[in-house]
Image: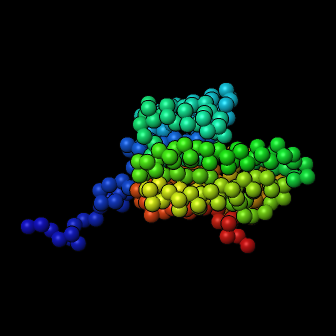
C-alpha cells in the first residue's frame, strides 16, 4: 500500500523534492569582462554550482588576459570545462568570433553574465567627451554587444539567462559620479526592455543591483568616504564580491524562470535608506 504523500517524510531542507534547485550542471556560461574581483566571484560561483564557465576580457589587453586565465583556472579547479578569450567587448566582430569559438569548443551558451564594470569618479566640468564615451562603452556598450551576440543564439534555441550589473547610482545622485551614473541608467533601461523583448523566447534578462562594495573602484576607495558609507549603510558594512554569488546562481537557475526584467538588489539596504 502506497503511503499518502502527506505522510511521506519531507525531503532534506537543502533540496527540493530530492533535487538541488540550484544545480547548474550541464549549463554553459560565459562571463564577459571577468577580469576583477567581481568577475572572479561571479564566474567561480557558477562553476561551483556546476556550470562550465568561459571568460571574456573587457579590453584587448595582455594584462586582462592574464587575469581572465587566472579566473578560468579557478573555475577549472571545480572540474568544469571552459576557455578564456581576449577580446574588445565594444567590438561586435571580436565578440561574435569569440562566442562562436567558445560554442564550438564547449557547447551552446545557456548563461551570459555581463561583468565588465567600472567607475570614473570625476567632476563633469573636468571630464572630456572621450572620458564620457569610455564610461558608456565600458559599462553599457559592452553589455549591448555581448548580449546581442550571445542573445541571438539563445533566442534561436529558446532558452537563456542573461544577468547584468547595475549600480544603485543609476538613480541616486552622488557628486562627481555623473558619468558613471549615466552609464548605469543605460544598463538599467536596456535590461528592463530587453527582458520584455526576449522573454517570450525563453530568454530572461535581469540585473544584480550593486551597492557599495569593497575591492571595487569607486568613491568608496577614499578612506573618509568609506567610513561614512559604513555608518550610512543600514547593515553597517560595504559589500563583498562573495555577496553576489548566491543571488547570481538563483537568477541563473530554473527557480528564477518567472523572474524577468528585474533588478535583484544586493546593497545592504542602502537603496531604501532615507
Residue 205 is left or right of residue 165, and the answer is left
| Towards the viewer: 240 or 108 | 108
- Taking the view exactly as shown, the residue that stands out farthest to the top is 62
- Taking the view exactly as shown, the residue that stands out farthest to the left is 1
Q: Please report the residue visible at 21 percent of the width from the left and 69 percent of the height from the top.
A: 5
Residue 213 vs 62, above or below: the answer is: below
Residue 267 is left or right of residue 5, and the answer is right
| Towards the viewer: 273 or 209 | 209
Disc tally is: 0
Q: In the rendered view of the protein, which quadrant contains the C terminus?
A: bottom right
Residue 71 vs 265, above or below: the answer is: above
Q: Is residue 198 visible?
A: yes
Q: Please report the residue visible at 85 percent of the width from the left and 50 percent of the height from the top.
A: 122
Residue 240, position in %: x, y?
Answer: 63, 50
Q: Is residue 264 visible?
A: no
Residue 174 vs 110, above or below: the answer is: below
Residue 89, position in %: x, y?
Answer: 64, 39
Q: Please report the residue visible at 36 percent of the width from the left and 53 percent of the height from the top.
A: 20
Residue 194 is left or right of residue 154, and the answer is right
Name the quadrant containing residue 104. Answer: top left
Q: In the rendered view of the protein, which quadrant contains the N terminus?
A: bottom left
Residue 121 is left or right of residue 261, and the answer is right
**Rendering colour mode:** rainbow
| Towards the viewer: 45 or 154 | 154
Q: Please report the residue visible at 53 percent of the width from the left and 62 percent of the height from the top.
A: 196
Amino acid at each position: 500500500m502506497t503511503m499518502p504523500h502527506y505522510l511521506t517524510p519531507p525531503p532534506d531542507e537543502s533540496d527540493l523534492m530530492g533535487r538541488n534547485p540550484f544545480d547548474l550542471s550541464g549549463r554553459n556560461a560565459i562571463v564577459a569582462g571577468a577580469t576583477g574581483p567581481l568577475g572572479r566571484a561571479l564566474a567561480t560561483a557558477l562553476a561551483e554550482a556546476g556550470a562550465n564557465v568561459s571568460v571574456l576580457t573587457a579590453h584587448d589587453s595582455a594584462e586582462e588576459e592574464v587575469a581572465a586565465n587566472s579566473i578560468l583556472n579557478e573555475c577549472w579547479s571545480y572540474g568544469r570545462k571552459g576557455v578564456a578569450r581576449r577580446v574588445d567587448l565594444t567590438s561586435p566582430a571580436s565578440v561574435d568570433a569569440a562566442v562562436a569559438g567558445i560554442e564550438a569548443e564547449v557547447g551552446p551558451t545557456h548563461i551570459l553574465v555581463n561583468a565588465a564594470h567600472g567607475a570614473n569618479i570625476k567632476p563633469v566640468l573636468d571630464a572630456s567627451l572621450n572620458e564620457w564615451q569610455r564610461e558608456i562603452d565600458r559599462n553599457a556598450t559592452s553589455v549591448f554587444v555581448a548580449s546581442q551576440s550571445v542573445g541571438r543564439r539563445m533566442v534561436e534555441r529558446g532558452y537563456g539567462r542573461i544577468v547584468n550589473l547595475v549600480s544603485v547610482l543609476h538613480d541616486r545622485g552622488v557628486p562627481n559620479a555623473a558619468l558613471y551614473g549615466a552609464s548605469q541608467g543605460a544598463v538599467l533601461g536596456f535590461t528592463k526592455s530587453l527582458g520584455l523583448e526576449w522573454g517570450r523566447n525563453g530568454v530572461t534578462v535581469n540585473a544584480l543591483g550593486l551597492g557599495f562594495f569593497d575591492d571595487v573602484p569607486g568613491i568608496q576607495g577614499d578612506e573618509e568616504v568609506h567610513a561614512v558609507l559604513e555608518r550610512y549603510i543600514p547593515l553597517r558594512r560595504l559589500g563583498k564580491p562573495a555577496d553576489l554569488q548566491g543571488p547570481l546562481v538563483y537568477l541563473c537557475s530554473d527557480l528564477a524562470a518567472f523572474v524577468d526584467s528585474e533588478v535583484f538588489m544586493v546593497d545592504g539596504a542602502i537603496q531604501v535608506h532615507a
